[in-house]
Image (cartoon, rainbow, N blue to C red):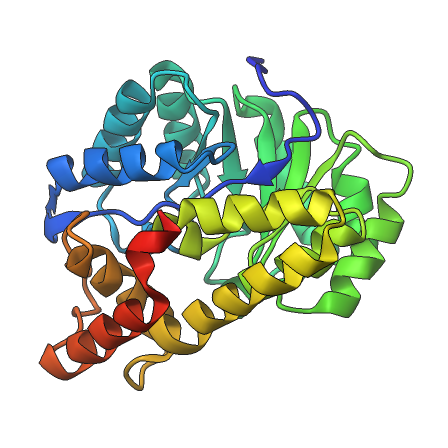
Amino acid sequence: MQNTLILPLRGIIPPVVTPLLNNNTLDVEGLERLLEHIISGGVHGVFILGTTGELPSLSHKLRYELIERTCLHVNDRVPVLVGISDCVFPESLSLAHKAADCGADAVVLAPPYYFALSQSEFLGYLERLVPQIPLPIFLYNIPVYTKVKFAPETVKAAAGIPGIIGLKDSSSDLVYLKQVQYALKDRPDFTFMVGQEELLAEFVLTGGHGGVNGGANMFPKLYVNLYNASVARDLDQVLKLLKTVMQVSSSVYLAGNSPSSYLKGLKCALSLMGICSGFMAEPYSEFGIEERCSIEKSLEELDYKSLF
């Protein structure tokens, strides 16, 4: 098993959006601009084919192309993590082997997201799948989409399976984060990261390893600086930066009236910033004029160029 990662992995790992020209075509130039924008912001890795990357909406052809192009463009400058979540066991394996062949550093796995699983069924699934995966594995807890919330005891048990090296949590539950941290108290090598950027500072201040934060697609330096300030326990700087993070969260992510407003707003902002296309894969559609104007105003109020 390839493992070039220093564990625990720490810092900001943006869940990269997937720039698209249409449902079947990557915005290749936009992808390259986005990756350069993110990496130049000092991030500690990139994560493709996650929720923010619209994984469930992408054809396998597009997924494979995205893996190839991302690994080639990043060229070992930062670790590349690849989402392999799928409802079909062999498809997850196929994505994992593609990631390994292209030089990715690790894969990220959420439970199959159609049939609900018990905790024991999920552990059994991992015990069957993980030995066949050629890269280190981060688990992905996102119960709003998968119907499975990993119990702290399940995380502890999964951490004992060779090959599983970390967890990204997107439950939005601060109590749960503390419970999992306690369950992992004897595993300082096991990476634990948070998805919700609003919780990043508190999480890192109390021992978390970093964030997989969508806003770092737009403003990587902002989130890297917040992470660094939290590690340094510079509370004045933390509060200052957190105010800006909350301004992003309360404006760009809340434009429109849709369950997908976070992702639509993020892609719309990136298109307004001239980085990549705002096209959304089916079944979603990108924002119209009214929402674009709202997000453009939000970016102006953020003085977004000062955040680069």
Q: Residue drawn 56% across and 59% down?
A: 241
| Pick the front one: 127 or 139 | 139
Residue 306 visible to an observer of this rendering:
yes
Where the N terminus falls, by quadrant?
A: top right
Residue 187: give x, y in percent of width and height.
84, 34
Residue 291: give x, y in percent of width and height.
20, 79
| Pick the front one: 262 or 233 | 233
Q: Residue drawn 25% across and 34% down?
A: 66
Q: Residue drawn 55% across and 13% down?
A: 2
Residue 129: give x, y in percent of width and height.
57, 33
Residue 195: give x, y in percent of width and height.
56, 56
Q: Is residue 301 left or right of residue 6?
A: left
Q: Please state the total of marks drawn on the protein image.
A: 0
Q: Is residue 131 left or right of residue 308?
A: right
Residue 260 visible to an observer of this rendering:
no
* Residue 291 drawn above or below residue 70: below
* Residue 5 drawn above or below residue 110: above
Q: Is residue 223 left or right of residue 62?
A: right
| Pick the front one: 198 or 16 | 198
Q: Residue drawn 91% across and 37% down?
A: 186
